[in-house]
Image (spheres, rainbow, N blue to C red):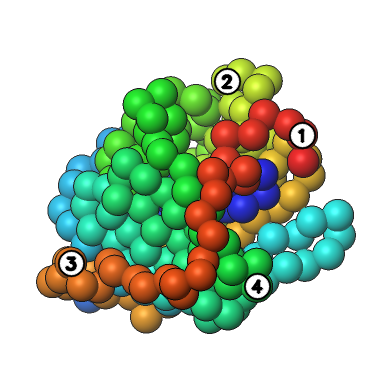
């Protein structure tokens, strides 16, 4: 279940998180409402077609810190591959219809077909992700509508709280840059796990071939219906 939540959070914020450029405005414009920010984010995300980056994930589970890292490649609207450096050689892949998780230490690949009723959870396009989140969560400023400074960079900090009690996350926080891009995402699950996602070495709208989304599994790998997804049991 925890792996599903990490994948869910990763996909919700995959396309929005991109590298700063010097061509954008240098100061934050005056903002009065959260809706102003979300509208500008939606418009910005529409230009993102591909995304390549190194990723890092931190999860605090029952007081214990767990880390993972690797490379991710994404192509709009529905294809991505995550190749882990740690845990070594683990792979997560989706073409929007089928999700696969390869676990080398078990020599198995979990497969889950994303039926229509589940696909909204796995929207990768930043614009669509925001529509999904707005349907499930109430957006507000975490403290105030004034940006905070981290180093020499200003950020708006948004808080998302679920509209329904049966939600994937108890709370989500987003750090939004002056370029209307999410530069940090942190979420607390209903089970008390805190997940933080970060990216570096980011490249946007790079030409990606079909070959870059292919991977070869060992011939004796066992395929199973993925037990980690869409499980309604508590963590």
- Seen from the viewer's position, the closer of residues 135 and 81 is 81
Quadrant including the N terminus: top right
Distance Cα–Cα, label 1 vs label 3: 37 Å
Q: Is residue 233 visible?
A: yes
Q: Which residue is mark 4?
A: 105
SS of the residue under disc 3: helix
SS of the residue under disc 1: loop
SS of the residue under disc 4: loop
Distance Cα–Cα, label 3 vs label 4: 27 Å
Q: Which residue is mark 3?
A: 210
Q: Which residue is mark 1?
A: 234
Residue 179: image quadrant is: bottom left
SS of the residue under disc 2: loop
Q: Pick whichever of labels 3 and 4 is earlier in the sequence.
A: 4
Q: Pick whichever of labels 2 and 4 is earlier in the sequence.
A: 4
Q: Pick whichever of labels 4 and 1 is earlier in the sequence.
A: 4
């Amino acid at each position: 279940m925890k792996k599903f939540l990490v994948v869910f959070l990763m996909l919700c914020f995959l396309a929005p998180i991109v590298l700063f450029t010097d061509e954008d405005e240098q100061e934050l414009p005056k903002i009065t409402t959260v809706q102003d920010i979300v509208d500008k984010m939606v418009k910005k995300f529409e230009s993102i077609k591909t995304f390549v980056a190194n990723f890092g994930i931190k999860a605090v589970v029952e007081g214990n810190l767990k880390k993972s890292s690797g490379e991710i490649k994404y192509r709009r609207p529905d294809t991505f591959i995550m190749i882990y450096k740690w845990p070594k050689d683990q792979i997560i892949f989706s073409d929007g219809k089928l999700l696969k998780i390869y676990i080398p230490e078990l020599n198995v690949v979990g497969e889950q077909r994303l039926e229509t009723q589940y696909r909204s959870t796995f929207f990768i396009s930043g614009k669509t992700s925001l529509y999904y989140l707005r349907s499930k969560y109430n957006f507000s400023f975490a403290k105030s509508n004034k940006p905070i400074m981290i180093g020499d960079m200003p950020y708006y900090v948004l808080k998302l709280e679920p509209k329904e009690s049966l939600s994937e996350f108890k709370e989500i926080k987003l750090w939004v840059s002056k370029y209307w891009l999410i530069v940090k995402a942190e979420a607390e699950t209903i089970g008390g796990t805190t997940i933080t996602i970060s990216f570096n070495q980011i490249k946007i709208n790079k030409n990606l071939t079909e070959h870059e989304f292919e991977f070869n599994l060992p011939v004796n790998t066992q395929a199973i219906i993925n037990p980690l997804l869409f499980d309604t049991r508590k963590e």
